[in-house]
């Protein structure tokens, strides 16, 4: 009986974990993003479009970090791996790519909410 209990205990400790799985980000709705933006929780809004697209109109308070500029190093605008990052682009394609890149770097609170083309909240222009 003791051998069986030990075998069960040992088997419970050898459960496989898939450590090869890519880190993940969370996809949220734009309504959820708006609710999160209303919180004073230290979040940052990241626009991953090109400079010319950003200048034509962006979500107020968003910082520009083009998707193409995100590699394997932490962007200087994002010094905290645990900061809440709300990320968008034009249609949702580049923001998904950028969100995955940031998760791969080690960011733990990445929330992707699609594209500005569907945004119903305020938009500001760059002066």
Image: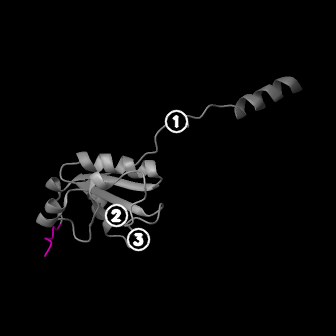
SS category of the residue bearing label 3: loop
Camera-side residue of 44 and 48: 48
Q: Which circle marks residue 100 in the picture?
A: none
Crowd class of label 3 (few under 14; some 14 to 19; many from 20; radius 10 Å): few
Q: Is residue 117 above or below residue 35?
A: above
Residues rendered magenta in the picture:
122-127
Lateral position of residue 80 relative to residue 32, left or right: right
> Which is more foreground, mark 1 or mark 2?
1
Disc number for residue 42: 3
Q: CA distance from mark 1 to mark 3?
A: 31 Å
Nearer-N-terminus badge (1/3)? 1
Locate the N terminus and report the quarter of the image it occupies.
top right
User: Badge 2, how many Cα within 10 Å: few under 14, some, many 20+?
Assistant: some
Q: Earlier in the sequence, mark 1 or mark 2?
A: 1
Residue found 14% across the figure and 54% down from its top: 117
Residue at the far bottom in the pictured view: 127
Residue 110 or 32: which is nearer the viewer? 110
Q: Is 6 covered by the magenta stretch?
A: no
Label 2, secondary structure: give it: helix
Residue 92 drawn above or below residue 12? below
95 horizontally vs 71: left or right: left
Magenta region, mostly helix, strand or loop?
A: loop
- The extreme right residue here reads 2
Q: Residue at x 38, y 73 (%)?
A: 40
Pointer 2 or 3: first along the chain: 2
Residue 27 seen in the figure: no
| Quadrant of residue 122 within the rendered picture | bottom left
Residue 93 appears anywhere in the view: yes
Mark 1 Cα shell of 10 Å, populated few (<14), some (14-19), many (≥20): few
Residue designated by label 1: 20
Q: Is 125 included in the stretch rendered in magenta? A: yes
């Amino acid at each position: 009986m003791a051998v069986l209990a030990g075998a069960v205990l040992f088997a419970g400790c050898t459960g496989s974990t898939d450590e090869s799985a890519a880190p993940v980000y969370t996809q949220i709705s734009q309504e959820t993003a708006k609710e999160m933006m209303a919180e004073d929780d230290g979040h940052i809004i990241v626009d991953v479009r090109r400079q010319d697209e950003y200048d034509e109109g962006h979500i107020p308070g968003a910082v520009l970090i083009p998707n193409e500029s995100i590699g394997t190093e932490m962007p200087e605008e994002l010094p905290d791996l645990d900061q809440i990052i709300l990320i968008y682009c034009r249609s949702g394609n580049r923001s998904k790519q950028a969100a995955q890149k940031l998760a791969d770097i080690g960011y733990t609170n990445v929330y992707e909410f699609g594209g500005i083309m569907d945004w119903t909240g305020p938009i500001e222009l760059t002066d």
